[in-house]
Amino acid sequence: MSENECMIEASLDDVFAVLTDGWSYAGWVVGASRVRDVDAEWPQPGFSIHHSVGTWPLLLDDTTTVEEYVPLMFLRLRVRAWPTGEGRVEFEATEKDGGCHLVMRERAVKGPAALVPQVVIDPALSLRNTETLRRLRLMVEGRRT
């Protein structure tokens, strides 16, 4: 499982305001190019963001569904990006030094990507998720100013 972490100079409320805003998803998730719809009940378990992955003209429409949500602490998502497969992404937040320490974990769970050995896929996921957390941090901190 790939694991990345970052410090965000913002409160847990500020961080989760972005994490749970389905319409902001394409602004900070590397690979997501647009959000087509967000279920009204998002981020409750079982509800989804309907997004597209890739760049025009090679866009794939898919979904990200909440598996578990503990407000201001934890968010687990089931991310679909077929034909590559499905992944599970977790965000775990703790308050630290007046800010938010955020840990992001990701692993492939279904489809072709799940067949790739972790030792091969983890470096690519780590690079992508470093950028994802950087974008998230900039978005959260930018909303505060």
Image (cartoon, rainbow, N blue to C red):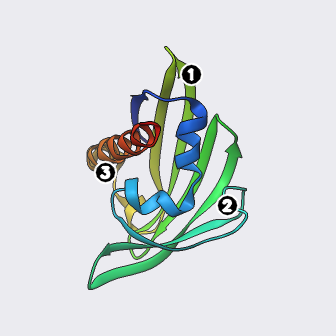
Residue type at mark 1? Glu
So how many labels did they put on this image?
Answer: 3
Residue at (56, 35) in percent of width and height: 92
Left or right: residue 92 versus residue 130 is: right
Residue 69: x %, y % from top left: 69, 46
Query: At 34% from the left edge and 51% from the top edge, which residue is drawn?
Result: 117
Q: CA distance from mark 1 to mark 2?
A: 24 Å
The residue where tag 2 is placed is 42
Residue 15: assigned label: none
Q: Is residue 14 visible?
A: yes
Whole-number angstrom distance, CA of label 2 to CA of label 3 = 29 Å
Query: Are dots 1 and 2 in contact, CB under 8 Å?
Result: no
Quadrant of the drawing holding the C terminus: top left
Residue 40 screen position, x and y as percent = 70, 68
C-alpha gap between disc 1 and disc 3 = 30 Å
Q: Residues within 10 Å of mark 3 (few under 14, many from 20)?
A: some
Q: Residues within 10 Å of mark 1 (few under 14, many from 20)?
A: some
Q: Which residue is mark 1?
A: 95
Sequence-earlier tag: 1 or 3? 1
Q: In the structure shown, which secondary structural element does the residue marked by tag 3 occupy?
A: helix
Q: Compare marks 2 and 3 and give the one earlier in the sequence.
A: 2
Name the residue at 58% across, 32% down: 12
Figure quadrant of residue 27: bottom left
Which residue in the protein does label 3 denote? 121
For the residues carrying marks 2 and 3, which lies nearer the camera in this image? 2
Q: Residues within 10 Å of mark 2 (few under 14, many from 20)?
A: some
* Quarter of the rendering occupied by the N terminus: top left
Q: Amino acid at mark 2?
A: Trp
Up/down of 52 relative to 142, above or below = below
Residue 79, image x, y percentages: 51, 62
Callout 1 secondary element = strand
Residue kind at label 3, given as amino acid type = Ile
